[in-house]
Amino acid sequence: MVKMYKVGDGDATLLEGKTVSVIGYGNQGEAWAKNLRDSGVSVVVGSVKDESYERSIADSFETTDIASAVKAADYHLLLVPDEIMPHLFEQEIGPHLHGGGAIVVASGYNISNKLLDYPGNVDVLMIAPRMIGTGVRSTYLDGTGFPSLVAVHHDATGRAGQVMLALAKAVGTLNRGAFQSSCDEETLCDLFNEHFGYVYSLRRAYEVLVEAGASPEAALLEFWASGEEMELARVHMTHGLFHQLALHSQTSQYGQEVTGRLGEADERAERERLRKIIERIQNGTFAKEWAE
């Protein structure tokens, strides 16, 4: 079983006297900064001077340019988009890191693809929420927390795991549970979920249903406009992917379990398609394509 960390595993007192820089004040950055502040952590926000910079000031955070935020802090949460992080790290983050500190990524992407040239004297950690930014904030406020994948990628200080768990507790994920992982595993799972074709499969189903004579309104309600999919997603989580079928009619159960199942040849073909997606992620083809 994979190790799951809970509230008792983190010691937030390790953050006393330390400053945490939140680099980027977007959906995740705003949520993390507010959660950390509410947990008693000293926070400085580093941002380019755009709308998010002004929003950070309006939210009463000490807000400065990125290089100055890094210089002022001990631990650094890199919450900027994957595609701009390498350049930003090279120019404004890496040169100002203090030995004995830590950088924290919320996605393994740039670490897994070796796109950050970090110094050997800092810890490299991952706290990757399985939750959008608004949920990171709302579940902190209601006390339920959010699940995360966490990892120590590089332990320069010998206490990287303790720091990771202290930050994880302060940001609120240990209330729900943080699962031991790696940057490679998080990157594979995250990208695969984005690449396997969910939105295209829904659109395809909608189009052929309308082609067969259903009105666009009826088809849209069936697949997503009604909000039923959100309720289904909730019971997938609470009951299980197949156990939730007990909440459906027997006609629905039969359709989903029997009629909806691919034949052997189609099943093999679909698995092969998915394996090719995984191969592109693992061999760096996608990262190269995205960078271009």
Image: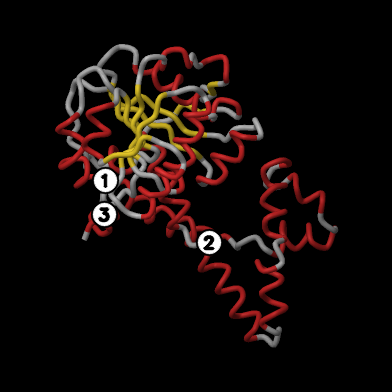
Look at label 2 and name its amino acid: Tyr
The residue that disc 2 covers is 198
Quote the CA–CA distance across marks 3 and 2: 21 Å
Which residue is depicted at the point 19% across and 40% down?
92
Q: Whole-percent x and y of residue 54?
A: 38, 49
Whole-angstrom CA distance, mark 1 to mark 2, is: 27 Å
Quickly name the residue at label 1. Answer: 85
Mark 3 crowd level (few <14, some 14–19, many ≥20, 10 Å Cα): few
Which quadrant of the rendered structure holds the N terminus? top right
> Disc 3 or 2, which lies upstream in sequence?
2
Which amino acid type is shown beneath numbered disc 1? Met
Q: Residues within 10 Å of mark 1 (few under 14, many from 20)?
A: some
Q: In the image, 111: left or right of 129?
A: left
Q: Quadrant of residue 253?
A: bottom right
Residue located beneath label 3 in the image: 285
Residue 241 versus residue 162 in the image, above or below: below
* Residue nearest the observer in this picture, 231 or 48: 48
Give residue 172's quadrant in the image: top right
Three-letter amino acid code at disc 3? Thr
Q: CB of mark 3 within 8 Å of CB of mark 2? A: no
